[in-house]
Amino acid sequence: MKNFLYFLTVKECESHLKQEIALRYPELRYAYSRAGFLTYKIAADHEIDNLEVIFAYSYGKSLGKSSKMNFFSTLESILKEEKGEVLLNTYVDIDFHLNLCEYLKAHPKIISEGNKASAQSVVLNIIKVDEDEYFFGSHLYGKNRTIINDYAYAAVAEGENTTIPSRAYHKIREALLLTKEEIKSGDYILDVGSAPGGISYYFLERDAFVVGIDSAEMSKQCLMHKRFKHIALPIEKVRAPEFGNHPFKIMVVDINLDPLFVLHEIRRLFTSVKSCSEIRSLYFTVKLTQKFSMDKLPRIIKELESLGFVRFLKKQLQSNRNEFLLYATKGQRKIVSKRTWSIKG
Ligand SMILES: C[S@@+](CC[C@H](N)C(=O)[O-])C[C@H]1O[C@@H](n2cnc3c(N)ncnc32)[C@H](O)[C@@H]1O
């Protein structure tokens, strides 16, 4: 007997995901795909909760699909099968999501808020893959998979919220939720490749101090903020005295250049700038440029290990495009992927 797994990715990373699965889990058999949505056949006894996949922001066990007409009857029969509590998570239009929440709010098995979920909670995912096609799937809560309800609907409101300088705001929000990083008032953040300023602005909103490095123009919201300092130069031209004596806690690097060049600059900052020596966490957006191939990733990790980083998370986020997040921390939290792998392309 076979089961099916589904994987969610962004369209820019579909071919990377296919390559990754073919290399790391060759036993999975490709079955079906829609934009950003792929299913694979898997043996019924295959372990599924601990797959390590970089290029899927979420994956789980497929529970079947339905048209609009059969949607609620399919949903009811799926919920009937679930033994424990269920957290609802949807990838559908916001209006449909809100209607669904309303419909399910009194359901005895549904817990509506993520903070009431435990590691045993089942996340029921509802994914609209086509005009009249909805997929149902589930996975356990957590396990480095992002939960859309926590953040992604904020992206819908992005157009309305004119104070957000760029969509990178959502990128850092999603990354911080995933890594459970706490930002405290007064923290110092170094933001490299900071223009126009979505990431800086996210930290400023949380009462942090931000130094942004980018020769491109920063948005007014950041430039006029009293806790923001702009160094309007490319990173390779910035020298130690310009960083001041701030005790940086987090470094974000979101530069649209070859990751190995960026790594070279990260190394320079860690080894020659005193105020960078205390940095605990690094959020590095690895751009999938023409020059870059995934077999260079172990080298990047090794270099970061030599700078004192001990834990790593490699994950494509829902708000990433042709890139993925490489999170490195000196802390002890266990969110590690130990498997190494290489892939061209
Ligand atoms: C994806 S955008 C960054 C978005 C930004 N993080 C935000 O929150 O809005 C990439 C940025 O990298 C910057 N960049 C390119 N080369 C750079 C370099 N050598 N040093 C610093 N920034 C660089 C570009 O000017 C561009 O603003």
Image (tube, rainbow, N blue to C red):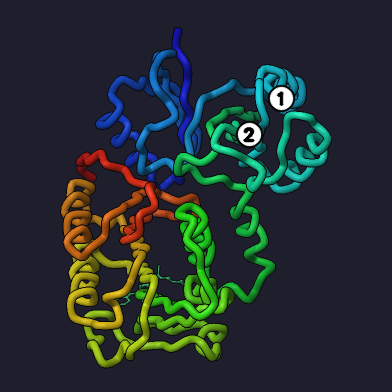
Q: Observer-nearest residue: 272 or 285?
A: 272
Above or below: residue 193 compared with residue 65? below
Q: Residue at x 22, y 54 (%)?
A: 301
| Quadrant holding the C terminus | top left
In the rendered image, residue 184, in percent from the top left (x then y), is placed at: 52, 72
Label 2 – label 1 distance at C-alpha:
9 Å
Give the left or right position of residue 170, taking residue 261 as reference: right
Q: Secondary structure at mark 1?
A: helix
Residue 23 falls left or right of residue 322: left
Asked if 75 appears above or below 119 in the picture, the reply is above
Which residue is depicted at the point 55% across and 88% down? Answer: 225
x and y percent of residue 326 in the render?
Answer: 33, 56
The residue identified by callout 1 is 75
Tell which circle, 2 or 1, labels the residue nearer the N-terminal end.
1
Which residue of the protein is positioned furthest toward the front in this rendering?
Answer: 332
Q: Is residue 12 above or below residue 44?
A: below
Closer-to-camera residue (130/276) = 276
Which residue bears the numbered disc 2? Answer: 126
- Image spot of residue 41 (x, y percent): 42, 19
Q: Amino acid at mark 1?
A: Leu
Asked if the residue at tag 1 contacts the one at tag 2, i.e. Cβ–Cβ closer than 8 Å, the answer is yes
49 vs 301, left or right, is right
Q: Residues within 10 Å of mark 2 (few under 14, many from 20)?
A: many
